[in-house]
């Protein structure tokens, strides 16, 4: 578990986000060490919102507040062949069909195309009726840290 600062509008238990790193407005901020303490590109889940005061922030218009976060799994579509809990999988690759209901799972935030990730759970059929790229996919949970 880590403690970090997040925009008050986003500070809700269960909210997930991918840490994007430092913004230009962070330069010179007195709270940099409390805000910029996560790993860039990792998906986190807020596990608790701390009872603390709101601090001014150059990035978040309503300020920031303290939260507890943990790295979390990522739901993704992977090739169906060999897609079982405990196995490793890679994403198929980018997809230009952004209107497809599976697009967020084919290009999920928090994982990259060139890396292999461990499957923690098989969810089942992806949300699309058929893949416009003729890919045979299964919806799974990936553990980016395994």
Image (tube, grey):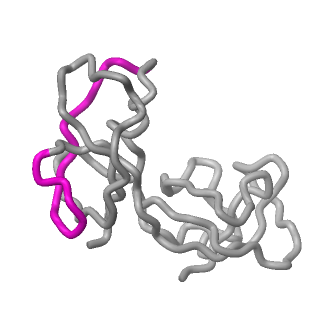
Q: Residue furthest bottom?
A: 1
Q: Residue visible at 63% across and 67% down?
A: 46
Seen from the viewer's position, the closer of residues 12 and 9 is 12
Q: Residue furthest left?
A: 81
> Horizontal and vertical percent for residue 30?
71, 70
Q: Main secondary structure of the magenta part?
A: loop
Q: In the picture, which quadrant includes the C terminus?
A: bottom left
Q: Residue at x 38, y 40 (%)?
A: 105
Task: Establish if 79 lies above or below 37.
Answer: above
What residue is rendered at 83% in x and 66% in y? Answer: 55
The residue positioned farthest toward the right in the image shown? 53
Which stretch did the figure color magenta?
Answer: 81-98
In the image, is residue 27 above or below residue 126? below
Q: Nearer the viewer, residue 112 or 39?
A: 112
Q: Is residue 134 left or right of residue 124?
A: left
Residue placed most toward the observer, 106 or 127: 127
List x then y, in percent, for residue 104: 43, 36
Q: How many marks?
A: 0
Residue at (33% x, 53% y) in the render: 140
Q: Position of residue 83 (x, y in %)?
A: 19, 54
Q: Which quadrant of the structure image shows residue 65?
A: bottom right
Tell me the quadrant of the picture where the N terminus can be found: bottom right
115 relative to 16 in the view: left or right: left
Residue 132 falls within the magenta-colored stretch: no
Q: Is residue 11 above or below residue 48?
A: above
Residue 48, horizontal then vertical, whole percent? 70, 75
């Amino acid at each position: 578990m880590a403690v970090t600062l997040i925009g008050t509008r986003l500070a809700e238990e269960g909210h997930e986000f991918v840490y994007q790193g430092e913004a230009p407005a962070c330069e010179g901020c007195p709270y940099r060490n409390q805000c910029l303490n996560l790993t860039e590109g990792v998906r986190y889940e807020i596990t608790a919102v701390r009872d603390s005061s709101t601090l001014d922030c150059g990035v978040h218009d309503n300020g920031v507040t303290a939260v507890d976060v943990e790295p979390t799994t990522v739901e993704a579509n992977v090739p169906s062949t060999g897609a079982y809990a405990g196995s490793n999988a890679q994403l198929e690759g980018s997809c230009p069909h952004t209107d497809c209901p599976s697009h967020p799972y084919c290009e999920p935030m928090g994982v990259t195309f060139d890396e292999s990730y461990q499957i923690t759970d098989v969810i089942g059929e992806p949300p699309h009726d058929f893949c416009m790229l003729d890919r045979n996919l299964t919806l799974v949970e990936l553990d980016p840290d395994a």
